[in-house]
Amino acid sequence: MSVDAVTTCKRIDAEFDRRFEVPTTEISAEARNHLASCARCRNLYRWIAEQPAATGVSSELSQRIQSQLVASLEPVKPVASIQVSGLRFMAIFLAFAVGLAVMMGAAGLRQMTAEQFLGSGLLLAAGAVLFSLSLARQMAPGSKRGIPTWLVMALFGSAALGGIALLFPWRMPGTSIGMSWKCSLRELAIAAPAGVLLWLLLRRSAPALSPTALGASLGAVSGLLAVTVLQFACVYQEALHLLLWHWSVLAVSSGAGALLGRLSSRFTLGRTG
Amino acid sequence: MTEVTATSATRQEERTGEGELPGLMARYQRGEAAAIEELVRRLSAPLLRFFSFSQVSMSEAEDLLQDCWLRIHRSRQTYRASEPVLPWIFAIARHTRLDGHRRRQRRMFREVLVADPPENPSHVPETGGDGADDLVDLLGQLPESQREVILMLKVSGMSLEEVARATASSVGAIKQKAHRAYAKLRALLAKER
């Protein structure tokens, strides 16, 4: 193959690349001329431009599917927009957080400075907004891409780690490990039923979603709810205590949610396989 | 070249009527049987093509198609009228395909555990010759994420934006995957012919 021909082939390749992006684009006259003389490019073009052999659906299969679906056809109410669904999750989060805070008291508030209260409040609110929107987005297959679930968690986790480390003093916790452990247990006792409740709310959209991502998001929201309640209820407002015994529950609940989601998909596959 | 123009026209024909899909979906959500019958009639062919080019036999592709329609039916309330239909449908189809793949792997693993290994463990696609087998073989040599993008772009005739929505990805990422896949396919085709 001459140098000229190779150059033209490369130009044709570039033109085909563009065609991949916009399949209906017509090729240039120069490319057409080149195709007439170059078997390699002609084959490539045929492969790109040709629609693969049509795979027909038999009328029997089509009717079987139609009758299956029609047999259980009932009117359904479409889910709300991502923004509305997100707001609903935030409202649920807020209602639970306020209710539980009233029940458990807010002794921790008296230990905080105004900066600590504002900083941790902003951090928790940002988490609630991010996780609520992430959940709402997962309820809509095929919607425009948002921030991936894992990135939302990584970003928020880093922000939380930095925020707590900067806002709260680094001194030895004023409590024993045995007492600190109780904070984590109380958080888990809040996160677990909250996760189940949220799952019941989301169940109607679950079949089409990624169970692992959904489980992780549910775990994150319920974990954050527990962290929020204990943030204002616990009297030990030291960075080490908060990070080790409070905020670590967020990571545990997200991981547990992801694991449960994965196990549930395996169980479903096992049942249908 | 005339053949090529004719096949482009077929793809165009398939894409016409897409504007009616949101209306059909809305009627389907209201419980109108005629709407779901029309949707099954219009969308089953591109869906079956999507499944049949995934290195499975035609009967398995048909099973996946049925499973996919059941999932669509169970999740029909998650479609929002303001959104395009194809990405919603193919996001569900994508999960159906992935679950089918995992299920097949589990089944093969169990079979290997209890019996002698099969002589030919790969699935033989029944795509009917005329170049389609070549395409299945070529796609089989791509990584899963690139294969999925090429399946949606080339086999199902979706746009970059639609593929991005269906795969919860960005248009830039889809372009990049398509270009990488295409470069690999180009190298494979040039080697073969």
Image (cartoon, rainbow, N blue to C red):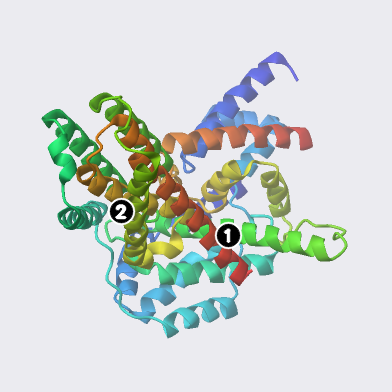
Which residue lies at the image location 54% right of the left edge and 76% below the top edge?
A: A62
Q: Quadrant of residue A272?
A: bottom right
- Seen from the viewer's position, the closer of residues A234 and A76 is A234
- Looking at the image, residue A112 sits to the left or right of residue B180; the answer is left
* Amino acid type shown at disc 1: Asp
Decide: is B57 above or below A18.
below
Quarter of the image that includes the N terminus of chain A: top right
State the SS at label 2: helix
Q: Chain of mark 2?
A: A
| Residue behind mark 1 | B99
Q: Residue at x 85, y 60 (%)?
A: B118
Residue B100 in percent (x, y) is at 61, 61
Tell which of A216 and A245 is nearer to you.
A245
SS at mark 1 in the image: helix
Q: Which residue is mark 2?
A: A136
Residue at 54 percent across and 65 percent down: it is B45
Q: How many marks?
A: 2
Badge number at residue B191: none
In this orientation, does residue A252 appear? yes
Q: Amino acid at mark 2?
A: Ala
Q: Position of residue A85 (x, y in %)?
A: 25, 56
Q: Residues within 10 Å of mark 2 (few under 14, many from 20)?
A: many
Q: Residues at badges 2 and 1 in contact (C-beta under 8 Å)?
A: no
Q: Where is residue B165 drawn, in percent x and y? A: 40, 48
